[in-house]
Image (cartoon, rainbow, N blue to C red):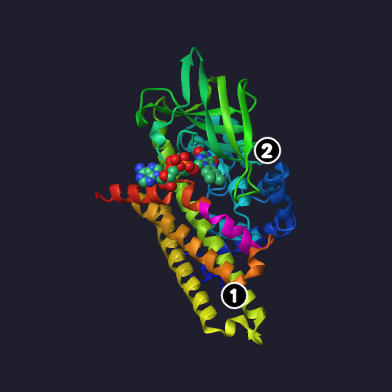
Amino acid sequence: MSVSGTSPFYNQEHEDFRSQVRRFVEREIVPHIEHWEGAEQLPRELHRKAADAGLLQIGFPEQAGGVEVPDLFYMIVLTEELARAGSGGLIASLMSHGIATPPICHAGSAEQIARFAAPVLAGEKIGALAITEPSGGSDVAALKTRAVRDGEHYVVNGSKTFITSGMRADYITCAVRTGGEGMGGISLLVIEANTAGFSRSPLQKMGWWASDTASLYFQDCRVSVANRIGPENMGFMAIMMNFNQERIMLATQAWAFAKVCYEDSLAYARERQTFGKPLIRNQVIRHKLADMKMRLDAVKAHLDILAWRVSHKQMPVAEVCLLKNHACTALEWIANEAMQIFGGAGYLRGSRVERIYRETKVLTIGGGSLEIMKDLAGKQMGY
Ligand SMILES: Cc1cc2nc3c(=O)[nH]c(=O)nc-3n(C[C@H](O)[C@H](O)[C@H](O)COP(=O)(O)OP(=O)(O)OC[C@H]3O[C@@H](n4cnc5c(N)ncnc54)[C@H](O)[C@@H]3O)c2cc1C
């Protein structure tokens, strides 16, 4: 029985949705994932197929073509099932609309939602979120990319880096400086990839290979004022709200990939023979597996409680930061133990455990690093 299957937070509808996602993953992803990892990007048609299967729309408003669901547990089930393909890059890139599109749906006009959110949720276009700059990602309020008003346009100059789906994105939800220094001078603009003066280059990474990650460059890009999401200089709050959601989803990914590591190690320990008996007949290996399960279940309980609170319109910022750290450090520990149980076989390319092990670090850095999460949680709690 799955960990989530034992939880009171999940009902038959979640389980029916799980079966639907599982079939999609087995049919459309698992046979191709090795190829996409090598190609360092996903085919665009996968977005269309995922939309046709109803996966991209979950949790988004109907106005944008989304499917409204009563709680976050649908997103957890979706992530858990996508993680069975054993590729964090797949989730990051296929689901990059999950960070790019919410600000448009929350703060955008009906016209902006129809233009920029609906085609992405339909799998026809690809969205990316561009906050981080070469000068630093942790200090969001210090971002430098400048947008200067010129009549009915902004003229944008600057650059972004580490942008997920950045090479393929059609619409980039981009944080720019329209005002003075600090958090009060930031706005969000949707920059279309065909804008004159926009260019990009790919970045090669330790993990998340299936995700195209890019540096983006804006040189005198003229972007219509109609592409600004929400009021001028009010973008920082939208970015922070988006981060909360992103952090819960990154914690979910960490838990889901830790679960894959645990399940694969357990199967391997049962099958692998050393010294004339299955590996699992050694107490030291059983203890490793028991410790992995203990941490996995602790993270899941933590995740489910916060998912329930967020589903009930609470936004426990400090707790979400700590959840992200809890889940990501548990993944690091569990992936490390999984590699040890696999021995040399774990070091070879091609297994889920090998890939997940390479992908642990991005979760402790992206969307707010361990250090920044602790500090923000502390401040929120009045330390
Ligand atoms: C694969 C990948 C995909 C990404 N996708 C996106 C994306 O789609 N969109 C996007 O906008 N960004 C994206 N990012 C960027 C990511 O969010 C940043 O890497 C992250 O916010 C950290 O910023 P930085 O790398 O510039 O590190 P820095 O801010 O330079 O920090 C470096 C180190 O110093 C620590 N540090 C910094 N300040 C302090 C402090 N005050 N006290 C203690 N420690 C501190 C940090 O914790 C970190 O460990 C992605 C990153 C990666 C690796």
Q: Is residue 147 left or right of residue 278?
A: left
- Residue at the bottom extreme? 276
Tell me the chief SS of the magenta region: helix
Placement of 356 over or under 132, stated as above or below: below
Amino acid type at image mark 1: Leu
What is the tally of numbered marks visible in this picture?
2
Are there few (<14), some (14-19), or many (20+) residues within 10 Å of tag 2?
some
Tell me, for residue 124, which label it has, or none.
2
Magenta stretch: includes residue 356: yes
| Secondary element at image label 1 | helix
Q: Which residue is mark 1?
A: 266
Amino acid type at image mark 2: Glu
Give the residue at x 62% y 58%. Answer: 355
- Mark closer to the observer (1, 2): 1
In this view of the protein, which residue sits in the foreground, 61 or 272?
272
Are there few (<14), some (14-19), or many (20+) residues within 10 Å of tag 1?
many
Q: Which residues are magenta?
A: 351-361
Give the residue at x 47% y 46%. Answer: 367
- Residue at the top extreme? 151
